[in-house]
Amino acid sequence: MKNFTKIVLACGAALSALTLSQAQAADRVGEALAPDMATLERYRWQARPVLIFAPSPEDPSYRAATAQLAALRDGLAERDIVVLVDTDPDAGGALRDRLGAEGFEMLLVGKDGGVKMRAGEVIAPETLFATIDRMPMRQREMQE
């Protein structure tokens, strides 16, 4: 899988802060989206994956989305967000196929594994955070 991109953590120094927590960062670095649902399933009840599908790593929407998210490390960690990316549609990833992702798409997956938000454009971090903060599970987390 030639250009199959790994979790944003492995994509460069500017994005190295995208983690659930500092303690969990080592487990996340260099992990690719699996050719099946195993990677996504592993995050169930642990994290809220944000999936970014793009036609290439040079895609302007991909670059904008990852730059915006990289700047919000604390907000991502606070909400248990992990960012997974796939920038190689030719690799035939089963996750991309199963979700029917074409071109650029961003998806928010809840801790329960359900798709909570999907857009063919960059989802503004404020919108992403507000959507998560309205979720009942997140409301309970904020009270604890």
Image (spheres, grey):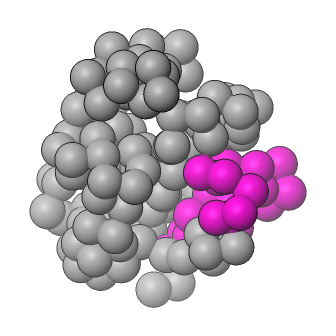
- Residue ID at (16%, 53%): 100
Residue 56 position (above or below residue 75): below
Label total for image: 0
Of 116 and 62, which appears nearest the observer?
116
For the question of whether residue 132 can be seen, the reply is no
Q: In which quadrant of the rendered view does residue 105 lie?
A: top left
Quarter placement of the N terminus: bottom left
Residue 26 at x, y percent in the picture: 70, 73
Q: Estimate the x, y position of residue 112 in percent, counting from the top left.
A: 21, 47
Which residue sits at x=29%, y=41%? 110
Q: Can residue 11 be found in the magenta stretch?
A: yes
State the extent of the magenta-drawn residues as a range: 3-25
**Residue 2 appears anywhere in the view:** yes
- Is 57 or 34 nearer to us in this picture? 34
Q: Is residue 14 found inside the magenta-colored segment of the image?
A: yes
Please state if 143 lies on the left or on the right of 19 as rendered: left
**At x 42% / y 50%, what residue is drawn?**
47
